[in-house]
Amino acid sequence: MAKKNTRNTRGRIITAAWKLFYEQGYDDTTVEDIVFESETSKGSFYHYFDGKDALLGTLSNVFDEKYEELLPTMSQDMDAIAKLTYLNHELFAMIDSSVSMDLLARLLATQLLARGEKHLLDRNRVYFRLLRQIAKEGLQKGELNSEFTANDIVKAYALFERALMYDWCLCNADYSLVTYSDRMMPMFLERFRK
């Protein structure tokens, strides 16, 4: 039970922080704001995080929560390409509507500069486990080109998603990320179709 409460407290802090970062901006959000919004304590905050900057790496947690939310909504009738396209569309729609370009750029920058843990590349994330599952099933069902391994497909897909996000940030979010990806992702994934 203690482990669940630990996850809930940490999760509440992360959820509150990203809500405030989006509403008030990163620079205008204080640790006190996050503690108040998450209904936790400063002691709890500092138990999990060294400071506000440490929360930048947790955007991957927010993304993973979105994937967990989407999993039961995916029709079993969808083939692997449709599932990957659906996941991309839904995540990028969430980014367009609730993650500012500035926050995404900060996350990408922290990952580029990180010497230790790179949250976006953590193969134990829900994201990578879900992608591997879809790729393996797609290969087993003959939906995906067997000249590629499941790992090849997952790595290429994740790389392409990061490239789309990086370019969106470079272009100052002057276009809709989800609209652009809805055009580009199907063309990219077509190479993996059998």
Image (cartoon, rainbow, N blue to C red):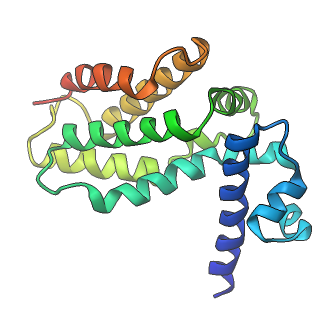
Measuring 76% from the left and 37% from the top, which residue is drawn there? 25
Q: Can you say which quadrant of the picture contains the C terminus?
A: top left
* Vertical placement of residue 86 versus 175, above or below: below
* Vertical placement of residue 170 versus 179, above or below: above
Measuring 45% from the left and 25% from the top, which residue is drawn there? 177
- Residue furthest out toward the front: 23
In the rendering, at what x and y percent does residue 63 appear? 52, 47
| Foreground pick, 140 / 162 | 162
Measuring 81% from the left and 71% from the top, which residue is drawn there? 40
| Foreground pick, 126 / 17 | 17
In the rendering, at what x and y percent does residue 167 appear? 53, 16
Measuring 15% from the left and 48% from the top, which residue is drawn there? 78
Taking the image as drawn, is residue 49 in sight? no
In the rendering, at what x and y percent does residue 72 appear? 30, 63
Taking the image as drawn, is residue 159 in sight? yes
Q: Quadrant of residue 32?
A: bottom right
In the rendering, at what x and y percent does residue 144 appear? 15, 36
* Vertical placement of residue 136 versus 84, above or below: below
Query: Is 86 left or right of 190, judged from the image as shown?
Result: right
Q: Quadrant of residue 69?
A: bottom left
Q: Can you say which quadrant of the picture contains the N terminus?
A: bottom right
